């Protein structure tokens, strides 16, 4: 079953119209790299922007999620993170966030590291709660999968 997951991910990526957004473009979601050279695993999160909220959710990722990613990455939470965007309306997801990880220990710690980074950047619990409510108004979670990276 393990070899099937990367094949499924590759098929999903190949079957969608998408743009890999890089940090060199002013309006793009960057790939955040931490200096590590390779990863063994990836944690993939799939989100679907609510109707009419595609651009607003993309802006939310740039303005709120990416600073948290930078903070967590700076502290070694992952090897890299890249956001992919599917403009194909038939796709189940509109935004896919891929966190590349060194190993299973880094995978287990990822959620806590991201939460901790968010707390460091916004210590006010009321503001964090309001930000969470705002993000929930922009998108729905489609799913998540952990995959092994084959080289």
Image (cartoon, rainbow, N blue to C red):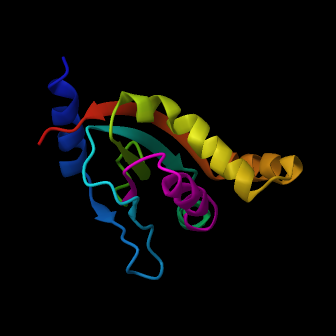
Tell me what residue is drawn at x 27 percent, y 59 percent.
17
Q: Residue at x 72, y 53 (%)?
A: 120
Residue 86 in view (yes/no): no
Q: Position of residue 140 (x, y in %)?
A: 57, 42
Q: Quadrant of residue 151?
A: top left
78 lies left or right of 5: right
| Residue 114 lies in quadrant | top right
Answer with the quarter of the image where residue 113 lies: top right
- Position of the N terminus, as image quadrant, is top left
Q: Please give the range of residues in magenta.
A: 62-86
Q: Look at 36% across and 71% down and name the residue there.
A: 22
At x 73%, y 49%, the residue is 119
Question: Is residue 114 visible in the rendered structure shown here?
Answer: yes
Q: Image height check: is 42 above or below 135? A: above
Assess whether residue 84 is covered by the magenta stretch: yes
Judging depth in this view, the residue of 145 and 92 nearest the camera is: 145
- Pick the residue in front: 135 or 109: 109
Residue 100 in the image, given as x and y percentages of width and height: 34, 46
In the rendered image, residue 54, in percent from the top left (x then y), is placed at: 53, 61
Q: Compared with residue 77, is residue 23 higher up or lower down, i.e. above or below?
A: below
């Amino acid at each position: 079953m393990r070899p099937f997951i990367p094949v499924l991910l590759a098929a999903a990526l190949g079957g969608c119209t998408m743009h890999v957004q890089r940090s060199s473009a002013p309006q793009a979601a960057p790939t955040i790299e931490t200096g590590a050279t390779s990863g063994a695993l990836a944690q993939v999160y799939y989100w679907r922007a609510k109707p009419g909220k595609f651009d607003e959710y993309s802006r939310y990722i740039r303005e709120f999620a990416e600073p948290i990613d930078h903070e967590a990455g700076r502290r070694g939470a992952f090897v890299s993170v890249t956001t992919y965007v599917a403009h194909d309306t038939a796709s189940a997801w509109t935004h896919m966030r891929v966190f590349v990880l060194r190993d299973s220990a880094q995978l287990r710690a990822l959620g806590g590291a991201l939460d901790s980074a968010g707390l460091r950047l916004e210590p006010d619990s009321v503001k964090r709660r309001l930000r969470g409510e705002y993000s929930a108004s922009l998108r729905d979670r489609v799913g998540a999968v952990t995959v092994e990276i084959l080289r």
